[in-house]
Image (cartoon, rainbow, N blue to C red):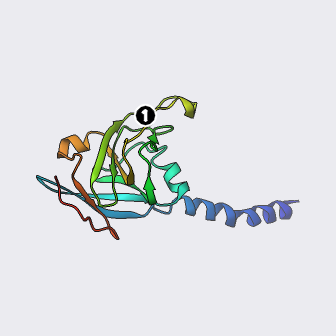
Amino acid sequence: MKRLLVAAILAVAPFTLHSASAAEVPAKRWPLTIATGAGVHEFHAEVAQTSAERSRGLMGRERLAEDGGMLFLYASEQPGRSGFWMYNTLIPLDIAFIDGMGHIVSTHTMVPCGSDAPADCPVTRPGVPYRAALEVRAGTFQALGIRVGDCVAWPGHATRCKPE
């Protein structure tokens, strides 16, 4: 009987260890800059490129580094009525919606939604088309003077704009 139990544990152990190590794999982080009229600000953003990564976003996070964030990338332009919600998101965030040229076209501050029902959480919409979005700690944009018209660049996307 003991041999059967030991064999069962040994048979399951590799799957348990693999699952644990897969959960610890760090997310892709890219250097990102935002050029404003007053200077350039540097961030290190996790990248969400797939539908699953974008859906998960920063849900469940209890903190975010001062220079951290999440960059949501889309293969095509998104309509201005498409937006973001804060369901299961624990920390307040600033969001910048970014057009294909790299201009920030809309910014908002979002607060966590405490509801257990996703439908009860408000959606933040930019009202204009966008190609990417950047979430950072709430208050960051105001503290750094980041605003609509500023320019964002990241690896593989050199900005083609100048701060307005």
User: Residue 117: x, y in percent?
Assistant: 58, 31
Amino acid type, label 1: Pro
Nearest the viewer among 140 and 26 is: 140
95 vs 113, left or right, is left
With respect to residue 50, does 79 lie above or below? above
> Where is the N terminus found, in terms of image quarters?
bottom right
**Residue at position x 62%, y 65% in the image:** 18
Nearest the viewer among 138 and 160 is: 160
Q: Residue furthest bottom?
A: 156
160 vs 18, left or right, is left
Nearest the viewer among 31 and 25 is: 31
Determine the image quadrant of residue 163.
bottom left
| Residue 48 seen in the current view | no
Label 1 SS: loop
User: Residue 30: x, y in percent?
Assistant: 35, 64
User: Residue 49: x, y in percent?
Assistant: 47, 61
Q: Residue furthest right?
A: 1
**Residue at position x 25%, y 65% in the image:** 160
Q: Residue furthest left?
A: 38
Q: Residues within 10 Å of mark 1 (few under 14, many from 20)?
A: some
Nearest the viewer among 131 and 29 is: 131
**Residue at position x 46%, y 32% in the image:** 122
User: Residue 132: x, y in percent?
Assistant: 38, 55
- Number of marks in the image? 1
The residue carrying mark 1 is 112
